[in-house]
Image: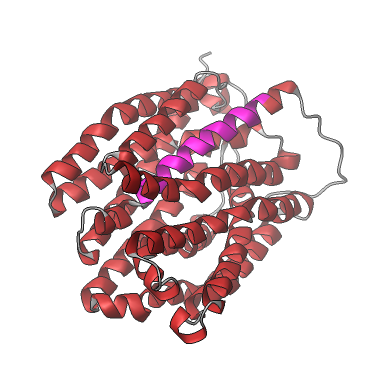
Amino acid sequence: MSDVEAPRRQDTQRALPIRQIAAVVAGNALEFYDFLVYSFFSVQISHTFFPEQDSDDRLLLTLLVFGVGFLTRPFGAIFIGRWGDRVGRKPAMFLSFSLMGVAITGLALTPSHAAIGAAAPVLFIFFRLLQGFALGGEVGPTTAYLLESAPPLKRGFYASLQFATQDLSVLFAGIIGYALANMMSPEALSDWGWRIAFLIGAAVVPFALAVRRTLPETFETRPRTATSFTPALWRAASLGFVLLMTISAAYFVIDYMTTFAEDTLHITPAIAFTATIAVGLSGTVFDVLSGILSDRFGRKIVTLSAGVIYVVAIYPIYYAIIHFGGVGVLIVASALLSALQGLYAPPILIGLTEGIPREIRAGALSLIYALAMSISGFGTQVVVKALLKYTESSFAPAGFMIIAIAIGVIAMLFVRETAPAKTGRL
């Protein structure tokens, strides 16, 4: 009997209805939309809260505030993620989303520096910290829920929806940004237009909360027993941490594309947001494709293959953006980078989730993910902007991405395969 045939005969777990899976991923998409929309409107936000600095320093300060949101992610992971292992995935997802609703509303309604002076950036930072805390507790329970809802031979597809819905949020943010940039003058977009994008996310929160209340629980709480952190588990967690850092470093460089197009290439906001739309659409499609491929061929081979192609392709893609320019080139290049990221990233998260015992899965995954995202997320866009400023080279983002993905490919060589179709284990 082949490796594929063995688990397939036992692949009888009944999947959740599509509407319930949609409820999980829709909430996840909205939560990441609320967090990432800040990045796409960095140039406009910088005028509102840091008007006294020059353009480069103003943007650097705004990107630092974006990074501040990552500092509280580990605390959210510890509190909300562990709660998901104690009382269930559903209550943890509900709490995380409720806190995100408060944070996004606060960000949208914080007065400008011109209105309340230095209190404006302080208040803005507070809501950004709350936003990071909320999101830190989202990924672990949500990914655990998706994996535990899936038939064994479709775990990759189900868990890939974690990244797919993140990219779906990028797509929505890009569409909204494009619409606002075309309907409003640059001055109006900087003064108050960016707030509309935040308020759109805030307006959906009550409906998403109502939908999440209807979800069944996938985790049966039991008296807690000590879980042995074996050398194999520590090894998997350490490798997963390094790999997630490479994912997030590349991810936030790609998400910086809108700001890069505006600030470095001096492209209008309306055109720059087309890059965001391309990133979101391409990423959503290839995230799901990667999950499906990893179910068939294994998590490791898909990540390694995509990673090698990714490293080789980054420089030529940036060369085309910088030297040929134009809307078409920007859109195609952004879509290609996102497609490669989509093929590379999901099997990493899927394999890490499969390798963590169910009893500690939500909390451990939340913490590993949050720490990796906090370190790379806090500094990536600031470092990229600083490199662009001080090296005076438009290729700085490309060099940063090449190093990150190359480290990931090397780390992946030491990762063990977890896909049931390859291991025969459910």
Residue that appears at 63% across and 62% down: 96
Residue 105 visible to an observer of this rendering? no
Q: Where residue 338 appears, x then y in whole percent?
A: 33, 44
Q: Main secondary structure of the magenta part?
A: helix
Residue 344: quarter of image:
top left
Q: Nearer the viewer, residue 101 or 326?
A: 326
The vertical placement of 199 against 389, above or below, is below
Residue that appears at 27% across and 39% down: 395
Residue that appears at 51% across and 55% down: 67
Residue pushed farthest top? Answer: 1
Q: On the picture, is 105 further left or further right than 47? A: right
Q: Where residue 62 appears, x then y in whole percent?
A: 44, 62
Residue that appears at 44% across and 24% down: 409
Residue 294 visible to an observer of this rendering? yes
- Residue 38 among those drawn in magenta: no
Q: Which residues are magenta?
A: 235-255
Q: Where residue 150 appears, x then y in whole percent?
A: 56, 42
